[in-house]
Image (spheres, helix red, strand yellow):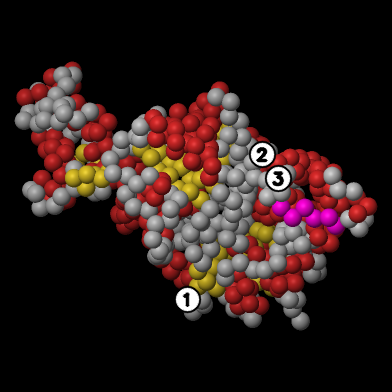
């Protein structure tokens, strides 16, 4: 007889009710069904397999892509009294033997394994003897060759399922376009099983995409005015830029560390551990810093280079605000991003089909960047979801951009490409259009061209914007080897007046407006300053300090003890007894026993309540 899932949710995880489609998924699994589950980051995917794992008999096998992610999830489960362990290459042989013995004797609830572990004959023999309650495939987009994090070892899951055909299989991901979803279903044998799809919307995340001017200064201004002293991730395209950005931020007073695959493994692990355990640290990283991050209080994700696709952008920005509190996704990009991304695709040794798909994915991202409409609408539309009206919280909704007829400017720019035989990049072409005499122009005789000086009424910034938008919207191609612009079918349609061109105005707002905007943006975030309606500004920080001390004693990230959202509820409710503290979301039975007295004492001391009046045993 299975346990009641709502009772498990209440007693173990400390939550009063399921969210979204969690209850549907869990009921389906408890009846022995398999499914593909699509939920946004922070939407509660883990509970979809953790709760039924505690309701069904046997051990749940969870396939997770990164060791750090498995470790953190297991630590969090142990904190609430769940028998969970990791089985991967970090264990000694004797430790692996102990785990296998515990799993075979029914002493485990969840067993986390890396996909690479599946591809061993020894594990296959072990898995054949297991009594499984379910199989959960986390980050299931890694199964698809079209997904943005393809992992070949995930393909071994089909063999595992063949060993246990009657065991429910859940494939879970936060990021999958229709093509990726279909491949997941085919590869994992889920063709006839249902798809549980929740909204991809993350309403607590505010999206902003702006043109690059001075990326570092823009980033520093963003952090200083809106997220000083808060945890964040800065994504960079290269390892070198990640290191240089972290070092530069450090000289400006920001606590920042680099993270990329080229660092020594011990250094990389140390930096990741510090990010998880310390508050207010910024990581400057390449995409190597990704799926293993389970930190709920990341207040911002910044991109100072263009990602490869909307899937990557959505996955990376989704690491902000997992606790449901306000967070921001901020990005700067420029013409150089467009050129370098297109060049990287064309120079790749991948198949022509992959290149075409990659170019389409990049084009979709560029369309989102250049859009004058609601960012949230464009983002959700890519995943096949409608958003009613404007969101009212992205940069385009808060400060609607101006658009203008750029047909004539576009024709002049394309004419310059044609007249120079499609052999040059933006810098040289802009100099020609502005009528500048440079060594390169004089040497090539380009001052005698009919297009020389026809754009002298526009500054360099405007012409750079024109070339960026022509490339982003598909009116110009980029030659792979040297990055020269090439005309295409759409170019000639514009030159022959067969179509028109609408351009986005890049001008920055006046100084007074920028100051007013920054003040408004500051008021958006109730982060460290969030207090209860009864006015206890010091209580939240006191609870955070207590949480940090308890976490350090156990070598855990602070959020594993309690999330910020749970601390805020404590501040809001100010429980006067252990019974009242037990009603706070996120305070389960085991955590109440471990930490209840200490947190209740801190609350009572901070608000001046006599312990004897609470009826609590401290």
CB under 8 Å between discs 1 and 3: no
Q: Residues within 10 Å of mark 1 (few under 14, many from 20)?
A: some
Q: Can the viewer see residue 242 in this picture?
A: no
279 with respect to 481 (left or right): right
Mark 1 lies on residue = 191
Q: Position of residue 606 (x, y in %)?
A: 81, 43
Give the mark nearer the N terminus: 2 vs 1: 1
Mark 3 lies on residue = 535
CB under 8 Å between discs 3 and 2: no
In percent of the image, x 55 and y 73: which residue is there? 35
Q: Position of residue 80 (x, y in %)?
A: 77, 59
186 with respect to 78 (left or right): left
Q: Which residues are magenta?
A: 572-577
Please tell me whether mark 1 or mark 3 is closer to you in this view: 3
In percent of the image, x 8 and y 48: which residue is there? 496
Q: CA distance from mark 1 to mark 3?
A: 54 Å
């Amino acid at each position: 007889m299975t346990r009641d899932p709502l009772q498990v949710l209440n007693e173990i995880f400390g939550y009063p009710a399921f969210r979204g489609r969690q209850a549907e998924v869990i009921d389906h699994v408890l009846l022995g069904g398999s499914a593909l589950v699509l939920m946004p980051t922070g939407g509660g995917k883990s509970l979809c397999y953790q709760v039924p794992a505690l309701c069904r008999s046997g051990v749940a096998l969870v396939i997770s892509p990164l060791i750090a992610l498995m470790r953190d999830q297991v630590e969090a489960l142990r904190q609430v009294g769940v028998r969970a362990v990791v089985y991967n290459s970090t264990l000694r042989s004797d430790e692996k033997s102990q785990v296998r013995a515990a799993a075979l004797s029914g002493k485990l609830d969840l067993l986390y394994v890396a996909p690479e572990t599946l591809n061993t004959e020894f594990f296959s023999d072990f898995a054949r003897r297991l009594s499984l309650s379910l199989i959960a495939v986390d980050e299931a987009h890694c199964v698809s060759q079209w997904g943005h994090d393809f992992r070949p070892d995930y393909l071994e899951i089909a063999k595992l399922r063949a060993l246990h055909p009657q065991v429910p299989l859940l494939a879970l991901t936060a990021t999958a376009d229709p093509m990726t979803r279909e491949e997941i279903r085919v590869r994992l044998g889920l063709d006839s099983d249902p798809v549980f799809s929740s909204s991809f919307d993350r309403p607590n995340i505010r999206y902003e995409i702006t043109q690059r001017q001075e990326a570092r200064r823009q980033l520093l201004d963003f952090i200083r005015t809106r997220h000083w002293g808060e945890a964040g991730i800065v994504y960079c395209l290269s390892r070198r830029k990640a290191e240089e950005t972290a070092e530069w931020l450090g000289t400006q007073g920001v606590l920042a560390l680099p993270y990329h695959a080229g660092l020594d493994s011990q250094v990389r692990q140390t930096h990741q551990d510090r990010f998880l355990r310390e508050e207010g640290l910024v990581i400057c990283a390449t995409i190597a810093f990704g799926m293993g991050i389970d930190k709920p209080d990341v207040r911002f994700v910044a991109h100072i280079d263009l990602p490869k696709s909307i899937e990557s952008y959505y996955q990376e920005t989704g690491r902000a605000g997992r606790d449901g509190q306000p967070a921001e996704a901020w990005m700067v990009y420029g013409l150089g991003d467009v050129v370098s991304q297109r060049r990287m695709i064309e120079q790749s040794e991948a198949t022509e089909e992959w290149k075409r798909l990659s170019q389409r994915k990049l084009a979709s991202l560029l369309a989102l960047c250049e859009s004058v409409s609601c960012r949230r609408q464009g983002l959700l539309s890519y995943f096949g979801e409608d958003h009613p009206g404007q969101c009212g919280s992205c940069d385009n909704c808060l400060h609607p951009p101006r658009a203008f007829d750029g047909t004539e400017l576009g024709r002049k720019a394309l004419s310059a490409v044609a007249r120079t035989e499609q052999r040059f990049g933006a810098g040289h072409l802009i100099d020609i259009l502005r009528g500048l005499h440079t060594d390169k122009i004089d040497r090539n005789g380009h001052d005698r061209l009919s297009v020389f000086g026809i754009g002298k009424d526009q500054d360099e910034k405007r012409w750079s914007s024109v070339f960026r938008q022509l490339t982003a919207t598909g009116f110009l191609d980029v030659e792979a080897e040297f990055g020269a612009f090439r005309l295409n079918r759409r170019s000639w349609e514009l030159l022959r007046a067969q179509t028109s061109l609408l351009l986005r105005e890049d001008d920055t707002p006046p100084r007074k407006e920028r100051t007013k905007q920054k003040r408004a943006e500051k008021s958006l975030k109730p982060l460290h300053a969030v207090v209860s309606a009864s006015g206890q500004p010091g209580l939240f920080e006191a609870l955070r300090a207590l949480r940090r001390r308890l976490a350090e004693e156990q070598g855990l990230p602070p959020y594993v003890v309690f999330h910020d959202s749970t601390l805020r509820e404590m501040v809001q409710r100010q429980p006067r007894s252990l019974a009242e503290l037990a009603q706070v979301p996120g305070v389960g039975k085991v955590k109440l026993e471990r930490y209840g007295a200490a947190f209740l004492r801190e609350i009572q001391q901070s608000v001046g309540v006599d312990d004897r009046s609470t009826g609590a045993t401290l």
